[in-house]
Amino acid sequence: MNLQFTAHTAADGVLTRSFALGEVTGVLWSPVDTTARTPLVLLGHGGGRDSKAAPMVGRAHRLVPEGFSVFCIDAPGHGGRPRTADDDREIAAMQHAMATGEPVGPIVVRYNLDLADRALPEWQAVLDALQELPELTDVPVGYFGLNMGTAIGIPLIAADPRITAAVLGIFWYDDQLAKLAAQITVPLEYLLQWDDQHIPRESSLALFDAFASPDKSLHANAGAHKEVPRFEFESAVRFLIRHLRPA
Amino acid sequence: MNLQFTAHTAADGVLTRSFALGEVTGVLWSPVDTTARTPLVLLGHGGGRDSKAAPMVGRAHRLVPEGFSVFCIDAPGHGGRPRTADDDREIAAMQHAMATGEPVGPIVVRYNLDLADRALPEWQAVLDALQELPELTDVPVGYFGLNMGTAIGIPLIAADPRITAAVLGIFWYDDQLAKLAAQITVPLEYLLQWDDQHIPRESSLALFDAFASPDKSLHANAGAHKEVPRFEFESAVRFLIRHLRPA
């Protein structure tokens, strides 16, 4: 099974290529000079979003001019990929909890960990395929994903030694995730929202605490679940530069 | 009582001037072009250190080329200023606790809050005097101080509306400090060490929580009390630029 580029555009020095590997779809952003070797950043999108969502495009367009290539794949059931009956049931359960004000956390955790199981071999297969491109063979690899991007990122980083730095955050403590986090030792920048209306503060702090990384930093910002400040995005870029593109 | 410059040197575009205001001594760092109006950063030094300590000189030499003036004053009993019998007793008590492995926190908190009471009018008098210089009249003012620099900074920032942004951290929760923190509403970047052997994690988190600032960020880094990572210093510089030197 080969990775196929299905469309491409170039603007502002960024080449944007949609791709498919079997039923898995995604986007690769890179310098227009495709012979340039660059570190590679994997972007994990949030729940209900996809590889073409504005935050993914914005992060990619900020990272490529800094000398990175970047890719994002659509999670199962996201970005036009088919949903199973289970997907439909879990999405309905989340929407019901949000509408009635019941805690959404337990449903999000259960559903996102299921998605992570399904997504993990997809991320590894796409990474395998992209690293066959000469400009991406054996380059340093990092991961950047919040919310569902963290639920998928933790198992992926624990499983794949190619990923050597990560920006994660905005997720609930869970015993299974904590066990995987305890296997992760790469440098980590971790975000939480201090006044998150969905994720209890203690839950966030406990998940951060679980990572074994000797070099880990928690950035906790005042504000609600969706109010991650813009300057954290700049901080993430500097973190990725520091660890993947050493001077 | 007038502020007197007692010595000056210039190197690498930084003019360093020692000063005295009565018995209060300190250092002002500024661009060599003293007609340039710049925002002003107050540096609070740590316990047992002074205005000439390497971290103060390093921060000043990083900030001045970014378009700031910077000053630090020696805390009472520090930097060659006379010690009282109380100072001697508290310092001996801290040294004894460190040597025997007893908790040093209660002594540090008690002594540093006493120093803060004595230092507060000194900081305000020096700020008054420096703002009479034409290049520093009515410029934006920020504060950057960890450890004892936070014990002094919290009462100072609560008392002085001229200070509009602050980098603080590495200190114990205390009811009196928390009451003052609850009066502080300026943008705040706050540091704690996740594995601090002296300050319990819950104590640090509770003090951060006490600040009323709508724009506050906690940076918690893996590592022991004295292992604040170098990149936090760069983050503090960016924070001060963002708030005191808007584009």
Image: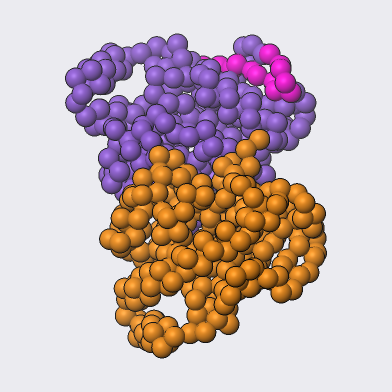
Chain colours: A orange, B purple
Q: Which of B217 and A68 is in front in this view?
A: A68
Q: Percent position (x, y) of residue B10? A: 71, 16
Q: In the drawing, does residue A198 fall left or right of residue A165?
A: left
- Can residue A101 be seen in this snapshot? yes
Quarter where residue A43 is shown: bottom right
Residue B32 higher or lower than A12, as above or below:
above
Q: Percent position (x, y) of residue A107? A: 34, 76
Q: Percent position (x, y) of residue A35? A: 77, 51
Q: Which of B131 and B190 is in front in this view?
A: B190
Magenta segment range? B9-22
Q: Does the magenta stretch include residue A86?
A: no
Q: In the drawing, does residue A162 fall left or right of residue B86?
A: right
Instruction: State the predominant SS element of the stretch in magenta.
Output: strand
Quarter where residue A126 is shown: bottom right
From the image, which quarter does the N terminus of chain B lie in?
Answer: top right
Q: Nearer the viewer, residue A1 or B220?
A: A1
Q: In the drawing, does residue B194 fall left or right of residue A48?
A: left
Quarter where residue A172 is shown: bottom left
Q: Percent position (x, y) of residue A7? A: 74, 73
Which residue is outermost to the front? Answer: A1
Residue drawn at x 62%, y 47% as measured from the top left: A139
Residue drawn at x 48%, y 30% as measured from the top left: B44
- Can residue B243 be seen in this snapshot? no
Q: Does the magenta stretch include residue B19?
A: yes
Count of all numbered marks drawn on residues in the image? 0
Residue drawn at x 67%, y 44% as measured from the top left: B245
Residue B70 higher or lower than A108, as above or below:
above
